[in-house]
Image: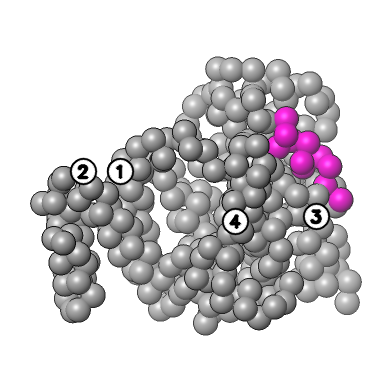
């Protein structure tokens, strides 16, 4: 049975992104399934971001706020949106033409999804493809092995997806009502706020639609803050995941296990980064909580790996 066509409010959060913003906006306006609206939230930019947006006129709604971070900007867009579904895009990335159509047509056929996601490409700033997201993550490879263009994740798929997810912000389609009920993206985190929300979504979901085709491009910047200072990024990553682990106490068992696996991996990565800096004692302190939480072979192995 055909259902009502979903109305997508697409939200682009931007901070000093004038150089790439037009490409992102064009990719939304040129969708084969037109968005209900496009909202650009300017998070206190000091470059020409406002001028880029205003050149588009009525097709783009512009909201300016004092700098408060990407989570606050996305949440402001969601509050202002009038569509029943939300989709997000960062100013340096872009949608492929069928991004919205792939989700919209499926929703018209099957309205029982809690949210939808999909594959995307990692690309260079010039647009050269590096790899696909699903092929680069355990949870994605499991689904790709089935060979279907569309697949549905249920409870059995949530642990590997939470532990090593492939769907990122720009391939997420979520009901606006659900997004607001969950409180949107958590503020106060510099890294991994998207994982925090995605995990809360998984915990509140029974059926998740996955399009196993690339729907968008995610640009890998060698000069990004996380690549310039990976140690600081990994410290922030662990901080966010510790908070998520605390919040996961009432989540289902598969989701809780996925959070713990992700946190353990993050602590390991932080430990290795500290070892490379010659800070072996700090590395041991970084992974020690895993031993406390899992006082078995894996915990001791993580500790010993910091010594070799």
Looking at the rendered structure, the secondary structure element under dot 2 is loop
Mark 1–mark 4 Cα distance, whole angstroms, equals 24 Å
Cα separation between marks 3 and 2: 45 Å
Q: Earlier in the sequence, mark 1 or mark 2?
A: 1
On-image quarter of the N terminus:
bottom right
Residue on which disc 3 sits: 98
Depth check, front residue: 253 or 262 = 262
**Cβ–Cβ under 8 Å for marks 1 and 2:** yes
Name the spot of residue 41 as percent of width and height, x first.
63, 32
Whether residue 92 is in magenta: the answer is: no
Instruction: Tell me the quadrant of the picture where the C terminus can be found.
Output: bottom left
> Vertical placement of 93 versus 45: above or below?
below
Q: Decide: is 130 above or below 71.
A: below
Position of residue 217 measured from the top left corner of the image (x, y, whole percent): 66, 48
Q: Nearer the viewer, mark 3 or mark 2?
A: 2
Residue 28 on the magenta segment: yes
Please report the bounds of the magenta region as a residue range: 22-32
Q: Which mark is residue 231?
A: 1
How far apart marks 3 and 4 lie (CA) works out to 19 Å
Is residue 59 in sight in this rendering? yes
């Amino acid at each position: 049975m055909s259902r009502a066509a979903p109305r997508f409010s697409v939200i682009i959060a931007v901070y000093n992104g004038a150089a790439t913003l037009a490409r992102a906006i064009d990719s939304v306006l040129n969708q084969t399934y037109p968005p209900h609206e496009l909202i650009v939230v300017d998070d206190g930019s000091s470059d020409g971001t406002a001028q880029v947006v205003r050149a588009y006129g009525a097709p783009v709604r512009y909201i300016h706020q004092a700098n408060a971070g990407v989570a606050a900007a996305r949440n402001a867009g969601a509050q202002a949106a009038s569509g029943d579904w939300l989709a997000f895009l960062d100013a340096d990335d872009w949608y492929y033409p069928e991004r919205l159509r792939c989700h919209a047509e499926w929703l018209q056929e099957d309205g029982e999804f809690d949210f939808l996601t999909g594959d995307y490409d990692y690309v260079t700033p010039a647009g050269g493809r590096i790899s696909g997201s699903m092929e680069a993550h355990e949870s994605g490879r499991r689904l790709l092995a089935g060979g279907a263009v569309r697949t549905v994740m249920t409870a059995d798929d949530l642990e590997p997806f939470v532990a090593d997810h492939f769907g990122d912000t720009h391939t997420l389609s979520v009901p606006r009502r659900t997004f607001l009920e969950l409180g949107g993206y958590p503020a106060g985190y510099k890294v991994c706020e998207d994982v925090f929300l995605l995990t809360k979504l998984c915990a509140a979901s029974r059926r998740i639609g996955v399009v196993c085709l690339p729907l968008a491009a995610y640009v890998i910047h060698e000069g990004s803050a996380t690549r310039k200072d990976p140690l600081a990024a990994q410290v922030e990553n662990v901080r966010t995941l510790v908070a998520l682990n605390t919040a996961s106490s009432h989540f289902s068992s598969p989701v809780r296990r996925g959070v713990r696996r992700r946190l353990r991996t993050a602590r390991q990565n932080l430990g290795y980064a500290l070892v490379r800096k010659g800070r072996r004692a700090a590395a041991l302190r970084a992974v020690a909580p895993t031993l406390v939480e899992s006082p078995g072979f894996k915990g001791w192995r993580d500790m010993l790996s910091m010594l070799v």
